[in-house]
Amino acid sequence: MTGVDKMAPNRRGVLIGGALGTGGLLVGQAIGVSAALGAPTEEAVNLNAFVVILPNNKVQVVVGRAEMGQGIHAAMAQLVAEELEADWSDVSVIHAPADGVYGMTSMIVQALPFGDSDPDGTIAHLRRKLGRFVGRQLPLQMTGGSNSIRDGWRHMREVGAAARHMLLAAAATKWSVPVDQCHASATQIIHEPTGRILRFGDVAERAARLSPPSNPKLKRTSEFTLVGKALRRPDLPDKVNGQAVFGIDVREEGQLFATLKQCPIWGGTLKSFDDSAAKDVPGFIKAVPVTDGVAAIATNTWAAKQALDAIEIVWDAKGNETRNSDGLRAEYFEKLGAVGDADANSHIDEGDAADVIAAASNTFTADYEVPFLAHAPMEPMNTTALVKDGACTVWSPTQSQGFAVPKIAEAAGVEDSKVTVHTTYLGGGFGRRGEIDYIVRAVEVARTVPGTPIQTVWSREEDMMRSSYRPMMLARMTAALGDDGLPMAWAQRNVGQAQMMEFMARNAPFAPPGTKDGSAGEGITHMNYKVGALQMDHVRTYSPMWSGFWRSVGHSHNGFFKEGFVDELAHAAGTDPYQYRRALLQGNTRALAVLDKVAQMSSWNAPLRQDRGRGIALHESFGSWVAEVAEVSMGADGLQVHKVWVAIDCGHVVNPDTVKAQMISGVIFGLTAALFGEITLEVGEVVQQNFPDYEMVRLHNAPAIDVEIIASTEDPGGVGEPGTPPIAPAVANALFALTGDRIRTLPLMNSVDVV
Amino acid sequence: MITFELNGAPVEVDAAEDMPLLWVLRDLLNMTGTKFGCGIANCGACTVHVDGQATRTCVLPVGDVAGLKVTTIEGLQGPGGSLHPLQQAWLDHQVPQCGYCQSGMIMAAAALVAEGAPITDDLISDTITNICRCGTYPRIREAIKDAAARPGQEARYDRG
């Protein structure tokens, strides 16, 4: 039908020749195509795994990163189009199939030696080539960690440049002229001496038969014409007219629908079910067991829901979580002060903080806590799956193509090579769609009706009660203070689940587990502030209830802990919190620049209305520095956040508009959590089921937000997550400035009324 | 069989009277522009116009729209695909991020703008309670005010 799957090209991409080297070989691999698209119209030519040229001279950039609102399809396409010399109006984006060539290979490259060699030289080139070759063999195709631009910054320009070289060489051959008399511009090749022009589409087939250059020279950043510009996202027109296809919008020929219920008590399993009442629901087909639950299959989603509601399910509670949130809190609190806990892992220990604190005459201690948080993306979990003839195809709004393939294969009972993943648009991700559970459930369902595509959609309740939560985390921080009120030592203990270790164990079981959680200390071990001796450990706790990646991960709790505690130290010293932070940054130019910028934007030094309070916070995460100021009031209806100012240094910017949008996004996401976000547990079952239980910031209480980007030529940092960690402390600090009440626990609605 | 007008054309569906209009649209008619977000009319992702009124469809029985005019996001465009001023403003301000909530958001905004009352921040706050998890609220406000100031214009998406 029209409009469905606009992301895919009009027919299978035909690979002519190969492109080993910067692009990689896609032998016989079609770029995601939906059977619902209808008759093919054009012959697409893949110049490499990332660049497709159509005879009508349009360019499709193949992006292996999930578009979940961060504008990554646009930004990656800008990088490719810059070096390719395609006119932006000719460029569209399609999502890549699941293939190792789209992996995040930079992390492998970074691990190799000779990292300090000239980036344009031979050693660096060979290093990248080796890293990418190794990376292709690993399941590294994923979107997360605010890493897409950092990973693609050079790589995407190289693939664009390689494709341009091939087109130029093909044109030069066709004209029988030296290639250095030709240049590319606006999706055309021009022969300067004669003014002859060929379109990319005219020579694409010939170009695809050529070998790409192995180390193409890239433009100087001063020569950029697309990168750095606020170009409009090519995916937005379909997002204002209802045409964009999210996972839940997939409609394949003959598709059935299903919905499911997994054991609401974490750790419990399915014992039995009775679907006799479901048989009366028109459209019901059958009920099938899935991992830890039951799915109802029907001819439409509504019938599936009606049928599921009519199914009597008996759960097996053996081995499940039995605790309440209050009980967990009490357990965690005990561990905050315990000595010699076997599950305590040190994350940093420099300068004998314990000794300095013991000897100090002035110390300050505070306990902070944050709750479990669900992601609650607007599009609930779903995937469409088809198991047929020893193969499995899924259409999924997924962040983790690499991890998904083997799990799909296992669930379907097919070989990995027989798995096809079509990635749709995501209606929000926030880390939840990095998990594979909702894909595997759909495959389990589809396997019971081979040959028929089945879309398994989760209800909002299921989505909220079965998330991969940001874990509840308690922290105790102690600082030894000098006569100037500045810290001489900082000791910190966090207690809570190990979200990264749990995620990796679930999704990347082949990876070595390690002994401590990589995210537990993030934001503390490299906190930018000079605090003297620094010691931090994390006591890991356990539950069948999943903890996992939630936007900004360890920074989401450590940002609140650190920026609240530093604020308390500032006030204890009688120093302005902005000046106090400046003093701790001693020569840290990038951190100082964002802090000074946000102070200037918010007129920090100017007097404030009597009824308003202002708070400041600074946090570095994912390679970027972000400082925020929040201005609040406490009226009759409660706390209101009027305005937020954000300054970000993310190095080189690809698209400044998407950076600003992501800062606004990160702030609203973090603010929602700060004001209202709380997932609680009662006898192992999540209490919150739908939005009334898990309130959201909406238009009426969303603050105005100003964003400024620090101009920089440093390597890019991430932007998807860094806007989130500073907002909770900025608001709590503002509230303190206004009322004198220090709140160390989130959400704020548990301490004050909130508008 | 239940008959109603959908985006200007009569449509007949073979559905139980109590089947929510949302699922009639999405699953029986394959009109997937209107979205499912919560199932309890709290988030607004399922908003359409029924006789010009912004209406959440996830709990609205299809029997209740028999003989009425329903407009979905797919029907907001003018003849020949010309964008509604709100859609144009949404693009000019680059409002959507993931885009999932935007069908419902635009339909809610379109009903508000069509009422013709002067658009103020308070009016927007009081009338549009849709959830956007990506936080596009500041740009939504700008786009609504912008569109309300220039109704009825033809539009073209210039990628610039």
Image (cartoon, helix red, strand yellow):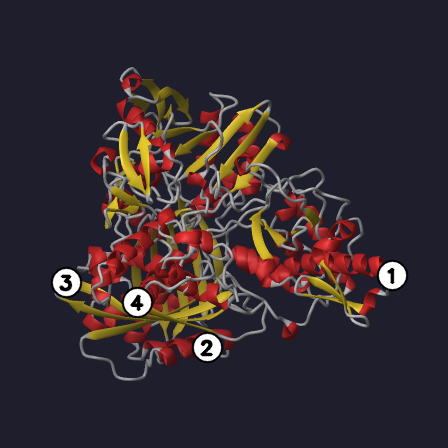
Location of residue B77 in the rendering, given as x and y in whole percent from the top left corner: 38, 53
Q: Is residue A242 left or right of residue B44?
A: right
Nearer to us of marks 3 and 4 is: 4
- Which residue is identified by label 2? A592
Q: Which residue is mark 3?
A: A637
In the depicted view, which residue is nearer to us: A8 or A290?
Answer: A8
Asked if badges 3 and 4 are on one and the same chain, I answer no
Query: Badges 4 and 2: C-beta atoms under 8 Å apart?
Result: no
Q: With A326 as the anchor, is A242 left or right in this view? A: right
- Callout 3: helix, strand or loop? loop
Tell me: A394 left or right of B126: right
Q: What residue is disc 1 on?
A: A176
Q: Three-letter amino acid code at disc 1?
A: Ser
- The subunit carrying tag 1 is A
Chain of the residue that carries numbered disc 4 in the rendered image: B
Which circle's residue, 1 or 2, is located before the other in the chain? Answer: 1
Q: CA distance from mark 4 to mark 2?
A: 37 Å
Q: In the image, which disc is placed on residue B145?
A: 4
The 10 Å Cα crowd at callout 2, few under 14, some 14 to 19, many 20 or more, is many
Image coordinates of residue A666 in percent, x first then y, are 39, 60
Label 4 sits on what residue type?
Answer: Lys
Q: Amino acid at mark 2?
A: Leu
Numbered disc 3: what chain?
A
Of helix, strand and loop, which one carries label 2?
helix
Front position among marks 4 and 2? 4
